Structures are given as C-alpha cells and as structure tokens.
Amino acid sequence: MKSAEYQGDRTVTVGASQAIAPGKGEVRLDVAYCGICGTDIHIYHGAMDQRVHLPLVIGHEASATVADIGAGVTNVTSGDRVAVRPVSFGEPSAFDKGHPHVGRNLKFIGIDLPGGMQSSWTVPAYTLHALPDSLEMSHGAMIEPAAVACHDVRLGRVQAGETVVVIGGGPIGLLIALVANERGARVVMSEVNESRLQLATELGLIAVHPVRQDLVRAVDELTDGAMADCVFEVSGSAPGVEVMTELPNVRGRIVMVAIHPEPRPVNLFKFFWSEIQLIGVRLYEEEDFDRAIQLASSGSLHLDRLITQTLPIDDVQQTFETIDSHPDGIKYLIDCRS
C-alpha cells in the first residue's frame, strides 16, 4: 500500500502506508483514482501551510471500492463502488443554521484530515455515494468537482432559456458551464487560455477571449441588449471581479465561486442601480453529489474530454510539476491502485 504525502516546500513524497481498520460508523476503502484539484495545487505551492499539518496525505476527489465496514454501517457493503464527499461536519452550531457543509466546525478531508491519494483510506460512512456499475471509476473521481458545479448552478437558480456567463474556464468553470448548459441555459465561457477556449467551443459553449474581445460588448450583441441572467466568477482574478458587475441584467445574479484570498475592489453602485444579487457558494450538499452522479452517468458532462492524463501514484511529484509548467491541462488523475 502507498500514500502521497505533502512535505512542504513543493514536495510530495510517495511511501508505504498501512490500512486503518474502520471504527464505528466508518468504512475502509480501496481507492481507485484521485484527482488533483486547485486546492491541492495551493497546498503544493505552500499557500495553505498555516492550515495543514505536515506531512499530509493530500487529495479529495476520489473514487473507490468498499473494502471493509465498521460497526453500525448500513448504507454500503463490501464491494460497493463509491465516490467520496470529503467533509467532516463536527459538532453542530447555531451559526450553521442547518447547513453543516459550511458550518463553523467543518473539517475538510484532504486538507484538515488525511485525504484520498492513498491505496487504503478510512472515512465516515456518511461521506459515501454509490456509483452505478456503468460509470467508469476514472469518471467516479470527477464526481466531487462535478458536485461543486451542481451546487453552484443550483444556488445560482439557473433556468432553461437564460443567458449564463462563466468567467474562467478551468475544471470547475467548464463543469459549471456544462451543468448550466444541461439545464437549457445559453452559456458564454470567458477564458484566456487558447486550448480551453477551443475545448469550450467543441463542447457546444460560446467561447470569448476577453483580451482579444470586449466581453461586455460580446454579451450585449449576443443577447440583443438583454445581457446575462446569471454570471459565475470562477477566475479568481481582479479582471474577472471588475467585469462581473458589467454583465448582469436587472435583478441578475452574480455567483462567487472563486476563492479571493485578498480583498478586491468591487463596483457596488451596479448592485444598487440594477438590483443585482450576489450569491456566495462553497462546497456542496448531499443532493449535489447525487445530481453529479446522474449527469456523469448520462454523458452530458463529457468527462473523457476533461481528463487530461492519468498517472500512477509513484509519479505524483512529476504530475504536480507538469501542472505548473503546462497550464493547458484540465484534470489530472492519480491511479492509486499500484
């Protein structure tokens, strides 16, 4: 058995690991695939060293097979194929108002607790979602980011016939665009990377390069002046924040998906003038995982097109270095079965 551990200083090592027997309410998994996400990249770059405890087994986008179950577990049995919703809720708080996925005592598995980039992983049973036999296990590792997209589109209240603008065409941005497209929205993708723009076009989205084109003018012309009903800021960039308030129509919605660790200037007058709504989104809830599995199984998320490369766990350090030097990639998966 092996695990990939972040050691600090842009170093991830692979070594032998031991299976942890499941306790009450827990399940031990044989991990198949684990995706590398933007959060993992932030960890690798040292941006979260103040939060993580070293060494840390990283990764939270995982598909797996149930290997062993602890006492009291009834929702899965040995041999079940599952995706993992990597959240540990902790004690409920009045602050949470019944939403523990963003609760005060939330711990995220793969950041605050050992993650899924290992051969054997023991997790709470409530985190598991059954995967249909028809879904490839590599696609099962895409359920977690797809659930993020389902959550964001759901809270953005996207409806059929609406115009949606997604600012930022990385993995989450593309998945948001595809989920909104599946709902029947007309989706504009704003992205500066040429390869991602080409992929967006091939997936049936309207692609705009915001440096070569005026994004506001492009949306205005596309909609005959009606502008966007919903805008998703996924870029995490200052230009993305600057343009997002120029795009919505009256009572349009802006959904803040990206993490902006530093304060950004925002044109608040636009919110007053057109009664724009700003919606914050974070993580997902149980229903978002279920919806993501449905969409993945239907083929509407085109997951094969989003998976750039799959590599063995022994190559994890090389994979992080590749991601840093090749920004054209979308999603890299680590095969944890070796």
Image: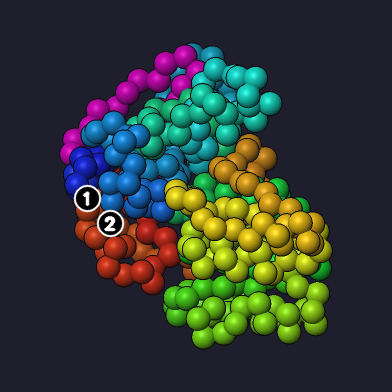
Q: Are marks 1 and 2 in contact (CB under 8 Å)?
A: yes
In this rendering, the label closer to the viewer, 1 or 2: 1
Residue 49 in sight: yes
Q: Position of residue 199 (x, y in %)?
A: 51, 76
| Residue drawn at point x = 51 percent, y = 41 percent | 83
Query: Of residues 44 and 82, which is closer to you in this image?
Result: 44
Quick check: 330 left or right of 295?
left
Magenta stretch: includes residue 18: yes
Query: Of residues 79 and 318, which is closer to you in this image?
Result: 318
Label 2 secondary element = helix
Judging by the rendered image, the residue that carries numbered circle 1 is: 10
Mark 2 crowd level (few <14, some 14–19, many ≥20, 10 Å Cα): many
Quick check: 282 left or right of 153?
left
Quick check: 74 left or right of 52?
right
Q: Which residues are magenta?
A: 15-35
> Which three-letter amino acid code belongs to the residue tagged 1?
Arg
Label 1 secondary element = loop
> Which three-letter amino acid code belongs to the residue tagged 2?
Phe
Q: Position of residue 204 (x, y in %)?
A: 63, 76
| Residue drawn at point x = 46 percent, y = 22 percent | 26
Classify residue 17 by image quadrant.
Answer: top left
Mark 1 crowd level (few <14, some 14–19, many ≥20, 10 Å Cα): some
Judging by the rendered image, the residue that carries numbered circle 2 is: 320
Query: Of residues 115 and 191, which is closer to you in this image?
Result: 191
Q: Position of residue 7 (x, y in %)?
A: 20, 40
Relative to 260, say whether 274 is above or below: below
Relative to 309, say whether 280 is above or below: above
| Residue drawn at point x = 31 percent, y = 62 percent | 323
